[in-house]
Image (tube, rainbow, N blue to C red):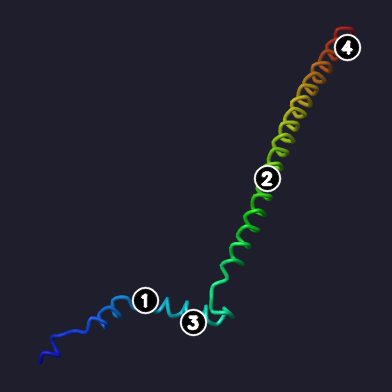
Amino acid sequence: MDKLFKRNPKSDFYETHRAEISLYQSAEKHLKKHLKSGALPMKAWKAEKEKLTAEKNRQYSEYNRLKDDVKMFDDVRREVDEIVRINSLDNDRNEQQRKRNKDFER
C-alpha cells in the first residue's frame, strides 16, 4: 500500500521535463554524429565569427557609401527636374509673348 502513495522523484522529474530532455538527447545525438573529435571546434568557430564580422563590416561600409551616392544622385535629379521645369515655364512664357506680339501686329 505504501508503494501506491510514494512516488519516484526521478520519474516525476522526467515527466515534468520530458520535452527538454528529449531536445537535449536529440541535440546530443546530432552533435555526436557530426563532430569527429567529440569536442566543439571553438577555435574554428571564433575564426569564422571574426571573418564573418569583418565581411559584415565591409559590406556595411559599402552600403553606406552606396546610400550616400544614391542621395547625391537623387539631389542631382531633383535639381535637373527643377531646371527643366523652369525652362519649360520660360519657353511657355516666351511662346505666349510671341503669340501676343503676333496678334498685336495684326
Q: Amino acid at mark 3?
A: Lys
Which labelled disc corresponds to residue 19? 1
Please, what is the three-letter code of the amino acid marked with disc 1?
Answer: Ala
Query: At label 2, which amino acid type do we have?
Result: Ser
Is 34 rendered above or below residue 2? above
SS of the residue at dot 1?
Answer: helix
- Residue tagged by mark 3? 29
Residue denoted by label 2 = 61
Q: Which of the two discs, 3 and 1, sits closer to the camera?
A: 3
Q: Identify whether 66 is placed above or below 7.
A: above
Which residue shows up at 22% across the image and 84% down it? 8
Image quadrant containing the C terminus: top right
| Residue with the mark numbered 4 | 102
Residue 40 percent location from the top left of the image: 54, 72
Residue at coordinates 79% horizontally, 16% vertically from top-left?
93
User: What's the amino acid at mark 4?
Assistant: Lys
Q: Earlier in the sequence, mark 4 or mark 1?
A: 1
Q: Position of residue 59 (x, y in %)?
A: 68, 50
Q: Is residue 24 above or below residue 82?
A: below
Q: Quadrant for residue 68, please give it.
A: top right
Q: Based on the displayed image, in which of its 4 quarters is residue 16 positioned?
A: bottom left
Where residue 41 sits in the image (x, y, percent)?
Answer: 57, 71
* Callout 4–callout 1 Cβ contact below 8 Å: no
Classify mark 3: helix, strand or loop.
helix
